[in-house]
Amino acid sequence: PGAAGWPRPCRCCGSGRCGRGSSWECPPARTAAGRPRGLDRILDGGAGQVARIGCERRHGEGATSLGLDPTAPDIHIGHTVVLNKMRQLQDLGHQVIFLIGDFTTLIGDPSGRNTTRPPLTPEQIKINAETYYTQAAKVLDPARTEIRYNSEWCAPLGAAGMIQLAAKYTVARMMERNDFHQRFTDGSSISLHEFLYPLLQGYDSVALKSDLELGGTDQKFNLLMGRHLQQEYGQEPQCILTMPLLVGLDGVDKMSKSKNNYIGITEDANTMFAKVLSISDTLMWDWYTLLSFKSLAEIAALKAEVEGGRNPKDAKVALAKEITARFHSAAAADAAEADFMNRSKGGVPDEIPEVSLSGAPLGIGALLKQANLAPSTSEANRLIDGGGVRVEGGVVSDRGLKLEAGTYVVQVGKRKVRPR
């Protein structure tokens, strides 16, 4: 990446960094005018490193990487902010490494957390990781993507290797990390194994010999750890691109499955469309900037129309259709719009997802959890107490309601399923 955009032409003989000799000239590459869209910061070693990376890519060399931990089975649209940037790099000629952090997930990323992340079992991690690449391939170009798992090099480290790795960083510097410092100040516990997470993520960069790594702004400390460890192991430190975090459906926290404020990229078209329409008018413009493929000029023009009196719902519907069409199809997006409009007028959608449940007669709380209409039985009870649950159109007020085997229309808010 150059100061004005993505990789630009460079003369290897001029940079003096790539060692190719004075007769080699790199062919032109496409550039973007102005600061790359959706980018928060570029952390690099200066113009020489930028020139070298651009040159290596045009000769099929170097490693561009992005790592995701399979903490849940779904990739959500918040992940696609950085995945879209990876795809842009692929379109510019980069081969990329999609790194699945199956080993680091055993620890749990402490980034942005005020408590220790609950551990996952190896079996849970394996199940979550099975569909990660299939989902990521909805954005990335499979022909330019290499899949790696960090258990390849982390697992063989053993106790001796872990001690050697830990010796390359100090506790004092680890405590400079904002979330660790805040937890220590607040008197909240920090488990020793949490210190290993940034070390092992940084070691990924060493193992891959990465010279360009992408991540969200919450990953800055971990990404910089990669630069530090690469220097410790005699490698040139990688360049880092950080992307803004997408705020979730609640308009408060970053999109996260644990906070239930997410849209999974494999969710059905109707649910995806309706969830986009549920966001606030203010949040909509941030989503346009980070998720839409419309130009900034088009977004600015649309925003001006809304400020001039156009109904903001028109802009939100356009965004919902664009996102839904990206992960399904234009026809599915049109059908989802029609379904939503029908439901908003009090109608029953033509197609309601059917889910098979076990254990009849089944308590209403357990039913909502099995049907993925509530993340837990306690949350289901809260929804019931608030009058937000309907069965066959009637409001449920009894937490102890049990449903016999059969087919019902069960509704939570605007979401409906037919358990059977």
Image: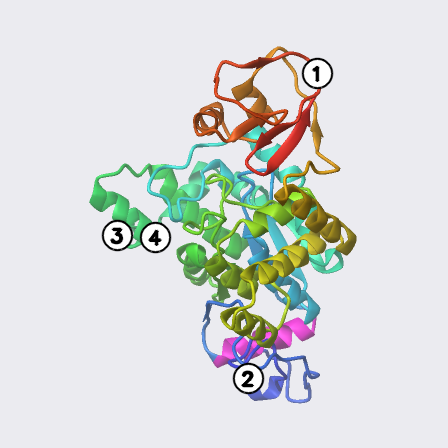
- Separation of disc 4 and disc 2 at Cα? 32 Å
| Image spot of residue 289 (x, y percent) | 54, 66
Identify residue type, mark 3: Ala
Q: Secondary structure at mark 4?
A: loop
First in sequence: mark 1 vs mark 2: 2
Residue 310 figure quarter: bottom right
Mark 4 near mark 3, Cβ–Cβ under 8 Å? no
Tell which tag, 1 or 2, sits nearer the viewer: 1
Identify residue type, mark 1: Gly
First in sequence: mark 1 vs mark 3: 3
Identify residue type, mark 2: Gly
As drawn, the label of residue 169 is 4
Q: Secondary structure at mark 2?
A: loop
Residue 52 figure quarter: bottom right
Quadrant placement of the N terminus: bottom right
Instruction: Name the residue carrying label 1.
Output: 406
| Image spot of residue 305 (x, y percent) | 56, 72
| Image spot of residue 264 (x, y percent) | 60, 44
Quadrant placement of the C terminus: top right
**Does residue 54 belong to the magenta stretch?**
yes
Mark 4 near mark 1, Cβ–Cβ under 8 Å? no
Residue 350 figure quarter: top right
- Separation of disc 2 and disc 3 at Cα? 37 Å
The residue under the point 48% across, 54% down is 280
- Separation of disc 4 and disc 3 at Cα? 9 Å
Q: Residues within 10 Å of mark 1 (few under 14, many from 20)?
A: few
Q: Which residues are magenta?
A: 47-60
As drawn, the label of residue 172 is 3
The residue closer to the viewer here, 275 or 172, is 275
Instruction: Name the residue carrying label 2.
Output: 16
Tell which tag, 4 or 3, sits nearer the viewer: 3
